[in-house]
Image: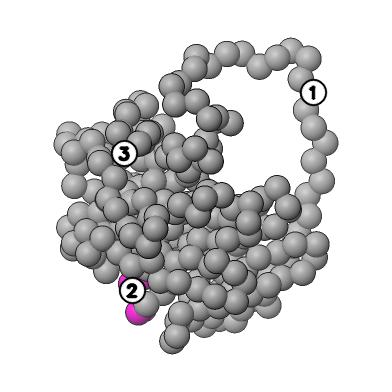
Amino acid sequence: MSRLRLTSFIALALAACNETTPKAITAPDAVVQTATVTRRDIGTLGGTNGYAMAINDSNQVAGHSDVSSSSHKAFIWKGGHFTILPNLAGSKTSVANGINSKGQVVGYVSITQINFHASLWRTPTTVQDLGTLGGPRSIAYAINTAGTVVGASDINQYQNAPFIWQNGKMTALPTLGGPDDHAAFAINATGVIVGQSETSLGKHRAVRWVNGVITDLGIWVAGWPSPPGSTTRGT
């Protein structure tokens, strides 16, 4: 059975790139100094737990937080102020995973107690249900400046697929042949997408899509965040 979990996952980083071909990994420059980082607790929306998931160049932070013991909402935070993003009618749970340079946010909103749909907040006062690929659940992970969204969706009760959403339409991306464990986690300004896919032999691989063509980048490393749709490991 396909298992898109009701959890957010850290996206794979797109390597600073407009390139469509990989470059060799080199050792870090010896003169590079470690930056001094100041940690700041931005708080919650009133509940116990809060999560910051993404930030844009305008220092807008997208995330999600408990509001109460029965409510959890997506937010944008900037300069010490929270903006709570709206839920779909009747929903008590929303999660923000990504934000682009325009301040548009993506994530998911609960539809029922166990099902949820990928969602897009074009503005802080509007929310759009992006639907699914046919199954009951979907999650959006990232959005680029052009407004193209990527994520993962159930196709049916037993399978899921990575997706790209653009021009109002959700389309499945190709996979490495396995029935499950597929997701698109990040997209850059040129539309290059990275994520995870399972092979027909059950191997989990890091992958990249360029113009809809999938490339196997290698083995999914133990200890990385489990992708959506994955079988629980070690529990």
Residue picked out by circle 3:
212
- How crowded pointer 3 is (Cα within 10 Å; few <14, some 14-19, many 20+) is rated as some
Q: Position of residue 49 (x, y in %)?
A: 62, 67
- Residue beneath the point at 76% across and 20% down: 32
Q: How far apart are the two marked residues, 2 and 3, measured between alpha carbons?
A: 31 Å
Which type of secondary structure does the marked residue at label 2 adopt?
loop
Q: Which residues are magenta?
A: 112-116
Which disc number belongs to residue 114?
2
Mark 1 and mark 2 residues within 8 Å of each other at the beta carbon: no
Q: Relative to 174, does residue 72 appear above or below in the rendering?
A: below
Mark 1, mark 3: which one is toward the viewer? 3
Residue picked out by circle 1:
33
Is 115 a magenta residue?
yes
- Residue beneath the point at 70% across and 48% down: 57
In this figure, which colouring scheme has been used for the structure?
one colour
Q: Amino acid at mark 1?
A: Gln
Q: Position of residue 24 (x, y in %)?
A: 50, 14
Q: Quadrant of residue 7?
A: bottom left
Which disc number belongs to residue 148?
none
- Residue beneath the point at 77% across and 69% down: 81
Q: How far apart are the two marked residues, 1 and 3, measured between alpha carbons?
A: 38 Å
Question: Mostly what secondary structure, the magenta segment?
Answer: loop
> Looking at the image, is mark 1 or mark 2 earlier in the sequence?
1
Q: Is residue 196 visible?
A: yes
Which type of secondary structure does the marked residue at label 3 adopt?
loop
Q: Nearer the viewer, residue 151 or 122?
A: 122
Q: Relative to 214, does residue 56 appear above or below in the rendering?
A: below
- Residue beneath the point at 18% across and 47% down: 179
